[in-house]
């Protein structure tokens, strides 16, 4: 009943017997022009996988449900065998619905859960130990569970200077010795903004960011995110 749900009736080889307007719109043609064509011809790289599902539904006489991803969209497909007068399954009713919004919500919920777990674990560590090194190690462990990264660091603000006190990378990127020794925070516009606003900062393109500081060992950095850690 959903006007955006794709539906069609095919034979056991994939020949289109009937098809609705939603499918025709997706294929940028008219429904009547699709009748008689093989649905597998519109499957691209998914052709063999879809052919296997059609054969399975026909052979076993039971409905098949599966999910597919094409570009940035997710689809759920259900294939129902239709019995003939001879009680053989020579036709298949196919229904396809776009579940992209559901998948995005599912991913967002998963990310929120990971974030909540990371925050809870960090709070537990902070309340159970006074060992500074343990706290720093756990912060980096928590970050990798929430945000994919090539390199991450924890910096300490010491008077007017900022210094890297923990660093981790998965790709062999060298740490920046100048930042490990400490530099005046006023020389790094991005950190000044984070400290003054008490808010995270995301830089999608460091090449376009005003006054972005480039060190010899940091030329590979093309995007950046920073969040303040505050004690109240």
Image (cartoon, rainbow, N blue to C red):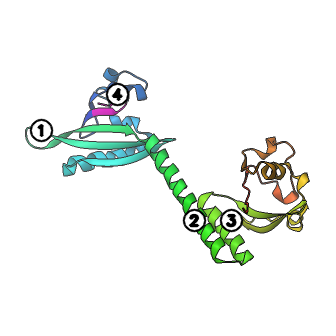
The residue lying at 37 percent from left, 26 percent from top is 24
Location of residue 209 (image quadrant): top right
Location of residue 160 (image quadrant): bottom right
Residues under numbered marks 1 and 2 in contact, where contact means CB atoms less than 8 Å apart = no
The residue lying at 69 percent from left, 76 percent from top is 134
Q: Residues within 10 Å of mark 2 (few under 14, many from 20)?
A: few
Q: CA distance from mark 2 to mark 3?
A: 25 Å
Element assignment for label 1: loop
x and y percent of residue 3 in the render? 34, 28
- The correct choice, above or below, for 10 with respect to 187 in the image is above
x and y percent of residue 191 in the render? 82, 53
- From the image, tell me which residue sits under label 2: 120
Question: Quick check: 70 left or right of 80?
Answer: right
Q: Residues within 10 Å of mark 4 (few under 14, many from 20)?
A: few
Q: Which residues are magenta?
A: 1-8
In the image, which disc is placed on residue 123?
none
Discs 3/1, front: 3
Q: Earlier in the sequence, mark 1 or mark 2?
A: 1
Q: Earlier in the sequence, mark 3 or mark 1?
A: 1
Discs 1/4, front: 4
> Which residue, as the protein is rendered here, is positioned at the far front?
232
- The correct choice, above or below, for 1 with respect to 211 in the image is above
Which residue is nearer to you in this view: 70 or 112? Answer: 112
- From the image, tell me which residue sits under label 1: 84
In the image, which disc is placed on residue 170?
3
Discs 2/4, front: 2
The residue lying at 35 percent from left, 33 percent from top is 5
- Say which quadrant the C terminus sits in: bottom right
The residue lying at 69 percent from left, 72 percent from top is 135
Q: CA distance from mark 1 to mark 4?
A: 28 Å
Element assignment for label 3: loop
- From the image, tell me which residue sits under label 4: 3
């Amino acid at each position: 009943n959903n006007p955006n749900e794709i539906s069609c009736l095919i034979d056991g080889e994939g020949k289109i017997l009937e098809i609705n307007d939603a499918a025709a719109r997706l294929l940028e043609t008219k429904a009547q022009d699709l009748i008689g064509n093989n649905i597998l011809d519109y499957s691209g790289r998914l052709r063999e996988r879809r052919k296997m599902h059609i054969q399975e539904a026909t052979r076993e006489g039971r409905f098949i449900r599966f999910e597919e991803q094409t570009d940035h969209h997710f689809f759920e497909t259900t294939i129902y065998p239709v019995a003939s007068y001879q009680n053989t399954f020579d036709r298949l009713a196919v229904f396809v619905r776009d579940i992209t919004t559901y998948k995005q919500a599912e991913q967002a919920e998963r990310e929120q859960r990971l974030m909540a777990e990371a925050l809870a674990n960090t709070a537990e560590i902070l309340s159970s130990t006074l060992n500074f090194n343990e706290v720093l190690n756990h912060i980096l462990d928590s970050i990798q569970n929430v945000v994919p990264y090539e390199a991450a660091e924890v910096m300490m603000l010491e008077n007017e200077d900022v210094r890297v006190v923990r660093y981790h990378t998965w790709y062999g990127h060298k740490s920046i010795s100048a930042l490990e020794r400490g530099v005046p925070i006023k020389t790094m516009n991005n950190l000044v903004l984070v400290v003054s606003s008490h808010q995270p900062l995301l830089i999608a393109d460091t090449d376009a960011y005003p006054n972005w500081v480039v060190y010899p060992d940091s030329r590979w950095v093309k995007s950046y995110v920073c969040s303040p850690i505050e004690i109240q």
